[in-house]
């Protein structure tokens, strides 16, 4: 299930292709969809050009392919605590399939929690790098409030709004995911190395680029489609006209995700892009976490907590089962108590609790965690709700 | 056509009833609609109770009726330069009829311009009395920008946003209307006496209450329906939850007028009411006058400037005809030049120019006024546009 096991040939081919095909390249995506990753690798190796690219571009891809070392990439990644998650894996977030041929070939993932489970209850909070004090305050407050309501806060790890959102979620003891435009073993920006490492320790750091790869302008832009697709909705906190965060917001809108904006003074250039989006169709003005949660929590098809657990207890991973067993019948307990009861670390307990939250087994109230009513019913042996 | 001529019996009955029936009283409005104002006055005088009120309430109305002196009210008003405009008058703004039985019995009007003509191209700019610097800045800037685009700015004459909007319009040499919740000869608030007198000098001060009458809390609230109905749209600049400006905005929405809000910091209690409206259906976020004008200018049925003059030149009042004649063929001139050419005061020239603007004869560009293309065609003897 993850890259540290002996990889199958399809998985190895996808790892190979993350060195060759740029994120979001729909031509490459179509090749993989129509012919399978193995056949695409074979054609690259044996120089049998595939349709839709110029000879010059084909040569560029061939040069990259010649340098690709997928087995070594997986080794390097594994040593750095990074796994490769791709379509077909239990951890693959199905929501990314909405990207069609721009779907990532796979994602490199640092951190304990299940990306798929966390994505189920996630919201993106994004915005300007050069944000104002107001923008940083709103990002941190929104993220903390979302985390307190059991939502996973996804952002891009950048300076400004992104960093404030991640820190807000971490500060509330909550769950957060950074989606990078470079190798996840190579935190960018450099000034956020410590923050990104903390996110990897308490949450998840993910990206399409293989280990050691660097960010480029187009990779930043295309990274945004992953943030939009992964989450149930995107909140733009501050953004000037033509800002990258607006790319995320528009991608979210195209993907049918909730698109939200935090208003600011009409006189602020850093709110102008947000206001532009709010003047269009379909975007919703939000001023606090409750408003965001109300909106994204409304997607009935993805809201397991309203309908009871979505996975039978027997199918839970052993670690998650142990954490679940450590929760008392009805009382609320802290993550530390759960960790002691389950014989694991607080970080691992928090990761598991958020997974169980996404699955509808537990709910969070402030710093306390407790079984949901539905979970208690299923614990007592199934049957109809009391 | 106005209250200084010998009044007909219906008009006198309406003047009488403005002393008896409170603004927005739909029971009284229904009486007048079903029986005519004269019959309602007769029933009050002869103590023949009308349906829909308790005996106690009927006695209250009778006591007011006993004290009413409509002829004297018209004399006092006339001496203060105030006329009475009511349904059936050429100056009556037909848009007020949308209020149904809550339609004013009539309006007391101070100022030269035609209320009906000005209402055709008017926008309400309203908001909190205790506004922030930001709110005052936005109100003044919006109003100035609207005035520069030939729009009439309507507000309530109050402290805060209202005052800033009136001043913004006046400062841009533009047209503005104050709708008061008291007699128009009795400026309220007292601290705005000078401002309201200036508005009466350059624009219009209107209200439902007869001369000398005072404002009450419910009169303030009910005044707002007149602002909403008179204008093509309402912009709320700053408003706390449960603010009176939200009454205006909701009334505008019910009446099918454009409802707009200026965003502010999500942390500002004085923007909370605006954000609440913007989160609802149908309200549009606006950040400058161009956005407001784009929206309200879109009501094709009321936009004479797009279709040429709406009244034949021969039907214009003599004063308006003289001002029109003072405009050169194609060159743009200032209001002062027009005033000299028409042999009138600059204030009168501005009032006439705005009427002609509403009728599609002239357009304003910055400080200059010129004939519209359609007006030039009709000046040259009608026929099809060149």
Image (tube, coloured by chain):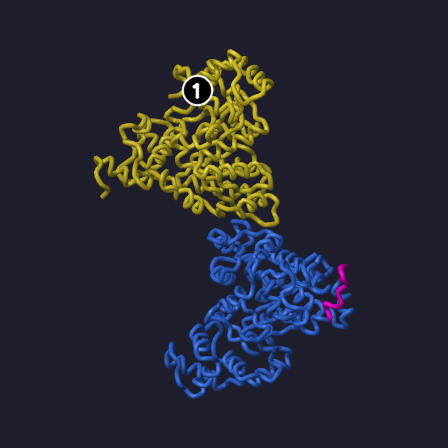
Chain colours: A yellow, B blue
Residue placed most toward the observer, B101 or A277: B101
**Left or right of B334 on screen, residue B81:** left
**Left or right of B29 on screen, residue B163:** right
Residue at 55% from the left image edge and 78% from the top image edge: B210
| Spot occupied by residue A172 in the image (x, y as percentages of width and height) | 44, 38
Q: Quadrant of the C terminus of chain B?
A: bottom right
**Left or right of B93 on screen, residue A324:** left
Q: Residue furthest top?
A: A46
Residue topped by disc 1: A36
Look at the picture and state if A354 lies above or below A83.
Answer: below
Q: Residue furthest front?
A: B383
- Is the magenta region chiefly helix, strand or loop? loop
Q: Quadrant of the N terminus of chain B?
A: bottom right
Residue at 43% from the left image edge and 34% from the top image edge: A175
User: Is-magenta flag for residue A253?
Assistant: no
Element under disc 1: loop
Would residue B173 be seen by someone viewing this image from the given angle?
no
Magenta-drawn segment? B322-333
């Amino acid at each position: 299930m993850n890259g540290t096991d002996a990889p199958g040939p399809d998985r190895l081919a996808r790892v190979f292709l993350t060195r060759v095909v740029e994120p979001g390249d729909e031509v490459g995506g179509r090749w993989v969809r129509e012919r399978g990753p193995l056949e695409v690798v074979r054609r690259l190796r044996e120089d049998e050009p595939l349709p839709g690219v110029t000879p010059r571009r084909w040569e560029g891809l061939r040069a990259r392919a010649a340098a690709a070392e997928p087995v070594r990439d997986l080794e390097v990644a594994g040593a750095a605590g990074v796994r490769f998650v791709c379509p077909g894996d239990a951890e693959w977030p199905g929501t990314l399939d909405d990207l069609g041929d721009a779907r990532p070939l796979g994602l490199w993932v640092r951190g304990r929690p299940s990306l798929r489970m966390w994505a189920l209850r996630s919201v993106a909070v994004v915005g300007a790098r050069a944000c104002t004090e107001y923008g940083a305050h709103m990002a941190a407050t929104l993220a903390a409030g979302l985390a307190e309501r059991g939502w996973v806060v996804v952002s891009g790890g950048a300076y400004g709004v992104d960093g404030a959102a991640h820190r807000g979620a971490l500060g509330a003891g909550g769950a957060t995911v950074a989606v990078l435009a470079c190798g996840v073993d190579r935190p960018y920006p450099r000034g956020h190395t410590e923050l990104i490492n903390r996110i990897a320790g308490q949450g998840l750091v993910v990206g399409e680029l293989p280990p050691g790869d660097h960010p480029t302008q187009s990779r930043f832009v295309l990274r945004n489609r992953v943030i939009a697709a992964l989450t149930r909705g995107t909140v733009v906190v501050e953004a000037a006209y033509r800002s990258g965060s607006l790319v995320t917001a528009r991608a979210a809108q195209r993907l049918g995700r909730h698109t939200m904006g935090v208003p600011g003074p009409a006189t602020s250039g850093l709110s102008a892009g947000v206001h532009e989006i709010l003047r269009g169709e379909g975007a919703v003005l939000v001023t606090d976490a409750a408003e965001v949660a109300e909106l994204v929590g409304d997607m009935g098809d993805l809201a397991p907590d309203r309908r009871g657990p979505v996975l039978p207890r027997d199918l839970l991973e052993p670690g998650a089962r142990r954490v679940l067993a450590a929760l008392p019948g009805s009382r609320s307990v802290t993550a530390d108590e759960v960790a002691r009861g389950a014989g694991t670390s607080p970080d691992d307990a928090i990761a598991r609790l958020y997974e169980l939250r996404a699955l509808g087994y537990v709910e969070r109230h402030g710093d306390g965690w407790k079984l949901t009513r539905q979970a208690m019913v299923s614990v007592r042996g199934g049957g109809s709700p009391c």
